């Protein structure tokens, strides 16, 4: 999910004022546009494409099914959850999250998760820089986070980053519908054919070479 300046559900005077976490959560219950929270400010978030939404749903479904089959009674959250980053006084919205253990929340009004084990982001050309850069950097301040998963929207490609001995390393890279991705922090693997089931990828057609002019 990416930040956008186009979505402006609030008037100027409301966008400029600072809100408490409690006010923010209360407004989000009624707002037609989701926002992230940053030091009292509300940041409108762009809506995703149909493919983005479908892939998010499939990832959450496969996480639930695979964890249940593995006998792991852990909580899986979709993009409605907010993760609170205390170091930045910021609330961000992942595309998915899993807690391997008992979830902890900053508030029980809507739910601001404090201890995700794994976070999933479905990346598009518009959101990739943010998801790989600033958003990942902020997620890394959470002591509980062990794995970060990037699911590419435009083709079957999934990457993971894992924390080992306090350092973040490149984990698994899976590409192609016949491949699967290992989620080390959860002890399971997901098939890309299931994550991308029924997704139609946009094909880029190379432009035809210009016709040569005939000599007369």
Image: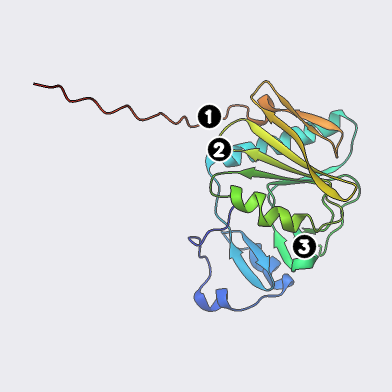
State left or right for residue 214 relative to residue 138: left
| Residue under the image location 58 percent in, 27 percent down | 198
Q: Dot 3 corresponds to which residue?
A: 85
Element at label 3: strand
Q: Dot 2 corresponds to which residue?
A: 51
Q: Are marks 1 and 2 in contact (CB under 8 Å)?
A: yes
| Residue under the image location 85 percent in, 28 percent down | 69
**Residue 9: x percent and y percent?**
52, 65
**Residue 78: x percent and y percent?**
71, 46
Residue 180 in view of the camera: yes
Neighbor class of circle 1 (other Cα within 10 Å; few <14, some 14-19, many 20+) is: few
State left or right for residue 184 relative to residue 41: right
Q: Of the two numbered discs 1 and 3 on the same chain, state the one appearing first in sequence.
A: 3
Residue 1 in view of the camera: no
Q: Dot 1 corresponds to which residue?
A: 200
What's the mark number on residue 29? Answer: none
Question: Marks 3/2: CA distance?
Answer: 28 Å
| Residue under the image location 66 percent in, 53 percent down | 133
**Residue 104: x percent and y percent?**
87, 57
208 shown above or below 101:
above
89 shown above or below 144:
below
């Amino acid at each position: 999910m990416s930040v956008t300046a186009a979505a402006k559900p609030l008037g100027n005077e409301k966008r400029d004022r600072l809100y408490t976490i409690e006010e923010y959560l209360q407004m989000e219950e009624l707002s037609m546009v989701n926002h992230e929270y940053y030091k009292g400010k509300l940041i409108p978030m762009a809506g995703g494409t149909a493919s983005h939404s479908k892939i998010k749903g499939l990832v959450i479904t496969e996480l639930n099914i695979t964890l249940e089959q593995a006998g792991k009674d852990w909580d899986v959250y979709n993009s409605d959850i907010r993760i609170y980053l205390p170091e930045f006084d910021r609330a961000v919205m992942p595309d998915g999250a899993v807690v391997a253990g008992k979830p902890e929340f900053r508030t029980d009004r809507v739910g601001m998760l404090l201890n995700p084990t794994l976070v999933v982001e479905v990346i598009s050309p518009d959101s990739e820089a943010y998801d790989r850069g600033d958003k990942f950097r902020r997620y890394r301040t959470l002591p509980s986070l062990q794995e970060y998963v990037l699911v590419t929207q435009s083709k079957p490609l999934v990457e993971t980053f894992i924390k080992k001995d306090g350092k973040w390393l490149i984990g698994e890279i899976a590409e192609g519908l016949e491949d699967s991705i290992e989620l080390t922090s959860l002890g399971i693997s997901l098939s890309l054919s299931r994550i991308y089931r029924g997704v139609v990828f946009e094909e880029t057609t190379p432009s035809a070479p210009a016709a040569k002019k005939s000599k007369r």
